Image: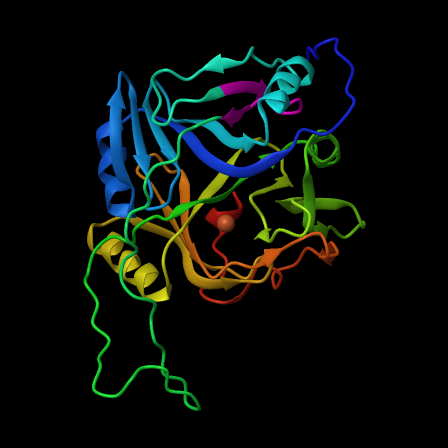
Amino acid sequence: MAEASNPVTRKINLVRIAHVYYIHKHIEKARQFLEAFGFQEVSRNGLNTYYRGVGSEPFVYCAIEGPADKFGGAAFVVESVEDLEYASKTLPNATSVQKLKDEPGGGLRVTFEDPVDGYPFHLVWGQAPIDTRPTVREKIKFNFPDEKTRPGNQFQRFNKGPAPVHKLGHFGMCVTDFAKTYNFYISRFNFRPSDLVYDDYGRDVTTFLHLDRGLELVDHHCFFFFEGPVSHVHHSSYETYDFDTQLLGHDYLREKGYENCWGVGRHVMGSQIFDYWFDPSRFIVEHYVDGDLVNSSHKTNRSKAGPGNLHVWGPDLPLEFLQ
Ligand SMILES: [Fe+2]
């Protein structure tokens, strides 16, 4: 794998995860699913269809029409244009800094190749944010047995429909060499492990990484990977508004005939309430709510791989989720 000849002197600072690319052979089926999942189309440009959430990212998902279903990589925002230039000079098979003329929000991008499995990984800077859209409704006032937060004579009423996507929260890969992958991402970026999971031999085989932003609170993970025989994207995950919204979206997808993969349930690492779906190309996408936040005072948690460490409630883990 070609590394540029410039010396590596520091880490590249990432700010947040921004968007993902997926190539779909049957683009119209993919578009129908993505609308039902809660994305909003922003624009079409050639073979690309861009989707936003209700947050300020100019797009969170790009569906590309192509000859075969394939993951096109995730993009992270870097802290400065210097990070982008440095990335271009020091990351494996990195492109030059390229101007994004045809993507919503514009900006600059560098794409490099994962050094172990070769999938594309994108870094962006200078995208223009967009106005956030109003959230679904007022924050829910929940009546607990010992605390009734909803005033009397007011009622819970909901509208059926897709669960609006707020933002891209994380994506995950199956990688063929965990140790090499881990060393690369931890040494070249400000990724820090929130959780490490080890196998029967004490070898770390899975990690959930957050971005080290000092005392700023960030999502428990924005990138995770685990070791397996064939590299592939595992899933990408999108935050929606609250539990009712998530379940309304679940019912909507089910009524439309889409195939649930796993959910609804509650994760252990990250704590999210999860709901995984197969899109028509068999990529797994997730709605989540109520994820944990961490900062630099969080100490990495290590636990042994086992059937009980992925979820605390919800349906049994399906084999398809692991394959
Ligand atoms: Fe997830």
Task: State the extent of the magenta-drawn residues as a range.
Answer: 109-125
Q: Quadrant of the N terminus?
A: top right
Closer to the camera in the image, 154 or 230: 154
Residue 66 in percent (x, y) is at 33, 19
Q: Is residue 294 above or below residue 56?
A: below
Q: Is residue 275 above or below residue 35?
A: below
Residue 169 visible in the displayed image: yes
Q: Residue at x 61, y 40 (%)?
A: 225
Residue 298 in percent (x, y) is at 71, 57
Colour theme: rainbow
Q: Residue at x 20, y 87 (%)?
A: 153
User: Number of marks in the image?
Assistant: 0
Q: Classify residue 65 by image quadrant.
A: top left
Closer to the camera in the image, 311 or 36: 36
Residue 307 in percent (x, y) is at 61, 60
Residue 127 in percent (x, y) is at 43, 28
Residue 173 visible in the displayed image: no
Q: Is residue 111 magenta-colored?
A: yes
Q: Classify residue 284 by image quadrant.
A: top left
Q: Residue at x 44, y 34 (%)?
A: 19
Q: Residue at x 65, y 44 (%)?
A: 213
